[in-house]
Amino acid sequence: MDSKVLFQEDQYFRQNKLIYVVYVVIGILIAGLMYLIKNETIDIFSMVALPLLLVVFISLATAKFSISITKEKISFKFFYIFQKKEILFNDIKNIYVKTYDPISDFGGYGFRISGNRTLYSTSGNTAIVIEKKNGKIVYLGIQKADEFEQIKNIL
């Protein structure tokens, strides 16, 4: 089995407004936690909730979505969100690139489910659409559509 990677892409959440909001929330959480510790007014709820929220928002700010394609399979992973997933080409009925509207089609970016369709994306409006033999459709957001189109015919 040839496991040479034919296509590889890594993406991060980089919508300016979203990332600024996340950084502001992180700053507020850190300042609030430091204030409570300094004034010795921290309670058990604050000791658990604020650090947990901090971890969640830092994870969002640094989350990475990776796609890797070989002749046998498509692998993808949202670091911090879910483990590596794989779709074997034997399970694929059709695969193509499509421009879509992440807001109206799925309600935003990230991991989204809408009927029999699932979206994994961090930004943009272009995706590899994978129609599986079981009827499910998977959208993998990509930035390098031209590069994918070049290797698609040898899959």
Image: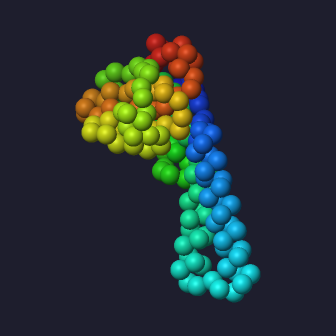
Q: Is residue 130 above or below residue 53?
A: above
Q: Residue furthest right?
A: 38
Q: Horizontally, is 14 left or right of 84 in the view?
A: right
Please report the residue visible at 65 percent of the width from the left and 55 percent of the height from the top. 24
**Number of numbered callouts drawn:** 0
Between 36 and 65, which is closer to the camera in this rendering? Answer: 36
Q: Is residue 103 above or below residue 130?
A: below
Residue 23 visible within the image = yes
Q: Is residue 26 above or below residue 74?
A: below
Q: Horizontally, is 14 left or right of 118 in the view?
A: right
Between 36 and 147, which is closer to the camera in this rendering? Answer: 36
Q: Horizontally, is 154 left or right of 136 in the view?
A: right
Task: Classify residue 40 by image quadrant.
Answer: bottom right
Please report the residue visible at 70 percent of the width from the left and 76 percent of the height from the top. 35
- Residue 22 % position (x, y): 61, 52
Between 33 and 88, which is closer to the camera in this rendering? Answer: 33
Residue 73 visible within the image = no
Please report the residue visible at 72 percent of the width from the left and 84 percent of the height from the top. 39
Task: Classify residue 86 by image quadrant.
Answer: top left
Please report the residue visible at 56 percent of the width from the left and 26 percent of the height from the top. 143
- Quadrant position of the C terminus in the picture: top left
